[in-house]
Image: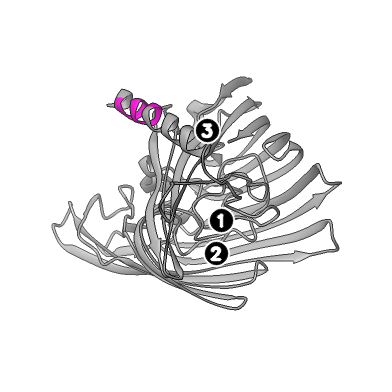
Amino acid sequence: MKYNKYLMIAAILPVGITASQISQAYDVVPAGQAVVTGEPSRVGAPWNHRSTFNIPGTNTDVTFGGYIKFDAIYDFDYNLGESTDPLAAATRGNATDGKTTFTVNESRINFRTQTRIDNQVLKTYIEGHFLPDGQLSLRHAYGEYYGFLAGQTWTNFMHFLGTPRILKLGGPVGYATGRPDQVRYTYKSGVNTFAAALEDPESSVSDLGLGGAADNTVRLPDLTLRYQYKNNFGISGVVRKFSADSLLTGDKQTTTGYGVAAQGALPLGDQTTLKGNVMVGKGLGGYLDYVPPSGAKFRAPDAYLAADGSLKAIELQSYGLSLDHKWNSSWSSSIGTSVVHQDLPDDTPAFQEVTDTVQFSHINLIWDVNSRLSVGAEFQHVNLEKVSGEKVDANRVMASAQFQF
């Protein structure tokens, strides 16, 4: 099956190259403008200079994009994986005296179309990457027209404007993220953007609670609302409904999750920006960027079954602060820290090895060699505390080269 995907890409590329030689090209994203929520990808923002070509005789423009990213990683204490998973430090089996990893699995490829219909533009977008196992897998696939969007893409609960520029995939810990299947409507009025969405209600109920394991049953979709002012401030909210059948009692249990997320970007002169993030609520484990789905119910679950058999949504708070600085037109740095705390029951034996609080800090130096190539180095520090009170520290150095196309 994977060979069919590569053959399809190989067949499409020559057609695109031929058409581009006989058509006019222009920038998809104007230089200097960041790619924000609702756009197809964060590839290269804010240095995205991908160009399109017009299909002759039509109102449709198409583009190929993506990047090749090479990461050279050295872990001092714990193997944090190819995409820096801070929770990996909670597993003793990941301890190391030193480990070097070279990987290109973050690399991605995408394809987009824009078709003008009267005074509106119909957009489609599809993107794949090679995480976590080197196999091509789907990141985004959606269509958008006149403010209406349907498909798989960034959750409406998240923001980009307060996220620092770092080499780690996905940004710091505790910044809401995810790419659920969804339907969304976005309305823009001047500098204000309003959006509402119904999203796939995928969630995780931990097997570790005193009430035993559970099978998730059919739930209502998540409802998300978002407001953004320019590229300076955004706030969003989510309401979720969880239900599960207890394998211990056979009873069906339900509970409600909810949360608020906000980000801000405050310019401090022409070269420096102070950025902040906050997310608080119940049942938000599925929105954490550092939790892989396979381990979520044991690491940052949305809910668990208590001893009395009731389903409990887990309280969660996260905060982040960073400073981005441009030394000149080519060199920039970011320094910052973020912390996540989830309120797991400390009297439950099975939860003792699960993370209660995790803090992630970073400092980097990045050189934009030109509009398509950037290289950089970054130091990352993880400070983690388990429900049992055990504390763990992990350190990583990461160097990257990113080639955009």
Q: Is residue 332 left or right of residue 67?
A: right
- Coloring basis for residues: one colour
Q: Which residue matches tag 2?
A: 279
Q: Quadrant of residue 394?
A: top right
Q: Reading the chain from its start, which is encountered first: label 1 or label 2?
A: 1
Where is residue 103 drawn, in percent x and y? Answer: 55, 24
Q: Is residue 73 left or right of residue 379?
A: left
- The amino acid on which the numbered mark 1 sits, given as a three-letter code, is Tyr
Residue 224, can we see it? no
Q: Residue at x 66, y 57 (%)?
A: 33
- The N terminus is located in which quarter? top left
Q: Which residues are magenta?
A: 4-10
Q: Mark 3 or mark 1: name the one nearer the start of the chain.
A: 3
Res. 175 mark = 1
Mark 1 vs mark 2, CA separation in Å: 7 Å
Task: Tell whether position 64 is magenta.
Answer: no
Dominant secondary structure (helix, strand or loop) of the stretch shown in magenta: helix
Q: Residue at x 46, y 45 (%)?
A: 291
Q: Which mark is residue 107?
A: 3
Disc with the residue nearer the chain's start (3 vs 2): 3
Instruction: Give yes or no for contact between labels 3 and 2 (Cβ–Cβ under 8 Å).
Output: no
Label 3: how many residues lie within 10 Å, few (<14), some (14-19) or many (20+)? Answer: many
- Please identify, in this view, whether the residue under mark 3 or under mark 2 is nearer the observer: 3
Q: Identify residue type, mark 3.
A: Ser
Q: Point out residue 392 in the picture as x, y percentages from the top left corner.
A: 60, 38
CB contact under 8 Å: marks 3 and 1: no
The secondary element bearing badge 1 is classed as loop
Query: The C terminus is located in which quarter?
Result: top right
Q: Are marks 1 and 2 in contact (CB under 8 Å)?
A: yes
- The crowd level at tag 2 (other Cα within 10 Å; few <14, some 14-19, many 20+) is many
Residue ranking furthest to the left: 250
